[in-house]
Amino acid sequence: MSEPLITADLVLLDADLGHTKTDVITNLAALVAKSGRAEAAGLAADALAREEKAVTGLGGGIAIPHCRSAAVNTNTLAFARLNPKVDFGAADGPADVCFMIAASEGSDDAHLTLLAMLARSLMRAEFLEGLRSATTPEQVVALVNQATQPDAPAAPSVAPAAAAPAPARVADEPRKKLIVAVTSCPTGIAHTFMAADGLEQAGKAAGVELIVEPQGSGKIDWLDLDLIKGADAAIFAADVPVRERERFAGLPVIEAGVKRAINEPSKLVAEALAAIDNPNARKVAGSAGGASAAAAGGGSQLSIGKRVQQALMTGVSYMIPFVAAGGLLLALGFLFGGFDIAIAPGSTPEARTCADLAWLSAEACKAGADAGSSIGALAIATGWGAGLNYLGAVLFAIGGAAFGFLVPALSGYIAYALAGRPGIAPGFVGGAISVTLGAGFLGGLVTGLLAGVVALWISSFKAPRWLSGLMPVVIIPLFATFVVGGTMYFLLGKFLAGVTTAMQDGLSGMSGGSAILLGIVLGLMMCFDLGGPVNKAAYLFATAGLSAATAANLHVMAAVMAAGMVPPLAMALATVVRKKLFTEVERENGAAAWLLGASFISEGAIPFAAADPLRVIPSMMLGGAVTGALSMALGVGLRAPHGGIFVLYAMDPLPAAIFGFLVSLAAGVVVAAIAVITAKSAWPQKQVAAVA
């Protein structure tokens, strides 16, 4: 039998958990950990990282910090009635009712449904009143259990009404307006379902039928297509792209963030009703017959800059798994087969010659060398007779295949973020052409944006009914791919390839002061926002250059990885050296940060930076700059895109590079730790709070 979501030992009434949301989150994470359901530092770090994406203060004195986390082993709710109240970013002031939702990464649909039911209950006045008037933890547990019991009469249903047929109407009854809505948030647990319930209640108050499809983390109860066809308007309250958006093509649409559907649902409903009678209202792109529409673009009310930023980050997020899988497999190939596995026998002074390849006959080796075959290709042709060289060659070949998708994936998913599924084919093809023409990741960025814009533009055409079915699968991909490919071959390809070559040449030519300056810049970027857009931009620059495998590119990768390891390791060291400057929770986070930093997980320092940004972030940036500069100055190269100290074997050249990497890393960690200790000692917390 599974454990209950909440128990009395997970409830705190009228508790003082600190004066900031970081204090509350870390204390609630410690409470969950005390019950054996999670690891405190990891849960706190993931919850605070989620907090960086969007505030979890909902208005009305409610806060719901939440996350999915590998640190959670049992889906859990922790509750605190806060005294004093704490600001979680809500527009109307601090919160006194706080639920922490801790979901494990492997949460099944049943648990997610219960969490969603709780989120919906938070929108109901009687539930909140019960929480505020409860005198014992057991009363709070009883209220939550009632809200999350699927069979309880008073419990709200999480499944959208769309799963059932539309209510029958009396013949003479005037037809109500029908509005369909989609809600979604990055985590897909709390805000998604609270927004759904808020919209449904606002719809009832306005006298309209409003049916919501919450696109949460669990199973989605999709709206019936016939229901959508009969709808008068749509509301998209979403912080992430709406899935299967093309189903709503042709409907007047109101778009907003998910928080607005929680705070102002009545206004959204009123705007949707006004859009129904407005011939100039924005409509979901595509044709009503089911043609394609943008997954995140058509009819969007987001600013152009925000949409482009969202598309670029989507492309990067989808590209990183290709980078990680391909790059680490390449590194493993080097481990088993040697770094010369990618080159032909005797082609360089460092490469093995035919005489060194005892597992291959002299005749076969000479024939392969004359044909330009790599040592890895010869090992694969030889089979298991090549021993570890064969295993290394196979790993290298698999990694190379995965790494080859880097630019196409970047381009394809940028286009997908702008134009939905019709943008994928022209985006991927544009990325492949960029690689063919030598335009690299710069070309991938351009082709992704171009493919998305072109596909979105074509999807806005109103096609006749007989053609609408072919639009998303044939017409749009065909013409968008032609436009993108033709633009690259006839106009932009050579120019972008020239720019890329110039960048590579400039990078390869960097030495002395210029290389050190680049290392400083990369170190500052890696430590500025600890996994945010600036950090990701530096990481993308490094990983994109790995495919070129030049010495300069390998130096950049080493500098980026070493600098990214500095913040968590520095904070871990600081909590050991000067324990009195840190709280007990921070010292626990510091213990966990050793492993996170060693694994190149910069986010391990987020709890410290979120609690004390004015002293922590500049200190970490100083250490990162030192590490980046030293790494470049010492000529450290790295062939793996991730892994931290666990990929030291992928350093280049061995063994000197390992020594240089560790020296650079240690210097930056020590500098950052000294800086943050000095700042905390010389600049008291009260002064920091006054400045903030």
Image: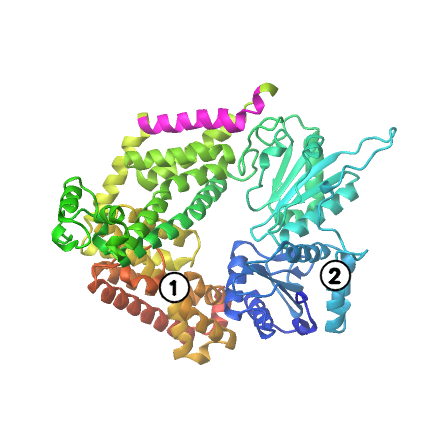
Decide whether the magenta segment is chiefly helix, strand or loop. helix
Q: Nearer the viewer, residue 76 or 401?
A: 401
Label 2: few (<14), some or many (≥20) within 10 Å? Answer: some
Q: In the rendered structure, which disc, 1 or 2, sits on the residue that comes first in sequence?
A: 2
Residue type at mark 1? Ser
- Determine which quarter of the picture holds residue 483: top left
- Of the residues shown, which amino acid type is indicated by label 2? Leu
Q: Say above or below: 13 vs 368.
A: below
Tag 1–tag 2 contact (CB < 8 Å): no
Whether residue 521 is visible: no
Q: Is residue 237 left or right of residue 545?
A: right
Please provide the residue range marked out in magenta. Answer: 467-489
* Residue 66, x across and y down, in percent: 59, 60
Q: Quadrant of the N terminus?
A: bottom right
| Quadrant of the rendered image containing residue 562 | bottom left
Mark 1 to mark 2: distance in Å?
A: 42 Å
Question: Element type at marker 1?
Answer: loop
Quadrant in which residue 620 is drawn: bottom left
Q: Check residue 19 in the rendering and tell me which mark sits there, or answer none.
A: none
Q: How many marks?
A: 2
Taking the magenta stretch, the answer to whether it contains residue 291 is no
From the image, tell me which residue sits under label 1. 599
**Residue drawn at (67%, 44%) of the image:** 221
> In this rendering, does residue 38 appear at all?
yes
Which x, y percent locates residue 162?
A: 72, 41
Q: Which residue is mark 2?
A: 128
Query: Does 500 sit above or below residue 2?
Result: above
Q: Residue at x 32, y 27 (%)?
A: 489
Q: Residue at x 67, y 40 (%)?
A: 181
Q: Secondary structure at mark 2?
A: helix
Q: Is residue 248 left or right of residue 583?
A: right
